[in-house]
């Protein structure tokens, strides 16, 4: 099982990460819209909803600036990487190891 994100979803996620690291709180939908040049706040809301459905983001309904990127370092994620690595080619295994390193996962 792997999480597949569109380019725009990944852009939203990266923007959220950078903004939150810089400011200490998550951006508003309008700030995301302006920061990424998206067409409308509803487009932002749609991307956010898809990221929540995919388990990448968490939000508190009705609360402002409540977007939280979920930690990829969860034990379940490490186990998924390990399981996936059992049934791949050597080339795919190298890619998975690089991805795990980027995410800071300890596959040992």
Image: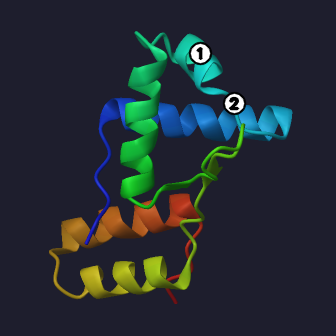
| Coordinates of residue 79 in the picture (x, y in percent) | 41, 87
Asked whether, in this view, residue 81 is left or right of residue 34, the answer is: left
Asked whether, in this view, residue 99 is left or right of residue 6, the answer is: right
Q: Residue at x 68, y 35 (%)?
A: 18
What is the secondary structure assignment of the residue under circle 1?
A: helix
| Coordinates of residue 106 in the picture (x, y in percent) | 56, 80
Asked whether, in this view, residue 47 is left or right of residue 102, the answer is: left
Q: Quick one: which residue is furthest to the front in this view?
A: 62
| Image colouring | rainbow
- Is disc 1 surrounded by few (<14), some (14 to 19) or many (20+) residues within 10 Å? some
| Above-or-below relation of 92 to 84 | above
* Circle nearer the N terminus (1, 2): 2
Give the quadrant of the N terminus.
bottom left
Q: Nearer the viewer, residue 41 or 16?
A: 41
Q: Nearer the viewer, residue 56 or 72?
A: 56
Q: Residue at x 16, y 84 (%)?
A: 87
| Coordinates of residue 20 in the picture (x, y in percent) | 74, 39
| Coordinates of residue 73 in the picture (x, y in percent) | 58, 72
- Is disc 2 surrounded by few (<14), some (14 to 19) or many (20+) residues within 10 Å? many
| Above-or-below relation of 70 to 16 | below
Frontmost of labels 1 and 2 is: 2
What is the secondary structure assignment of the residue under circle 2?
A: loop
Name the image quarter holding residue 80.
Answer: bottom left
Q: Residue at x 34, y 67 (%)?
A: 96
| Above-or-below relation of 8 to 71 | above
Q: On the image, numbered disc 2 is attached to which residue?
A: 27
Q: Are marks 1 and 2 in contact (CB under 8 Å)?
A: yes
| 3D distance between C-alphas at marks 1 and 2 | 10 Å
Q: On the image, numbered disc 1 is attached to which residue?
A: 35
Q: Nearer the viewer, residue 65 or 89?
A: 65
């Amino acid at each position: 099982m792997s999480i597949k994100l569109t380019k725009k979803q990944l852009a939203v996620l990266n923007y959220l990460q950078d903004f939150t690291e810089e400011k200490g709180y998550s951006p508003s939908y309008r700030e995301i819209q302006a920061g990424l040049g998206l067409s409308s706040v509803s487009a932002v809301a749609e991307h956010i909803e898809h990221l929540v459905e995919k388990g990448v983001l968490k939000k508190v309904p009705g609360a402002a600036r409540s977007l939280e990127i979920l930690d990829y370092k969860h034990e379940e994620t490490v186990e998924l990487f390990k399981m996936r690595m059992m049934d791949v080619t050597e080339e795919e295994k190298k890619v998975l190891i690089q991805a795990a390193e980027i995410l800071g996962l300890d596959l040992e």
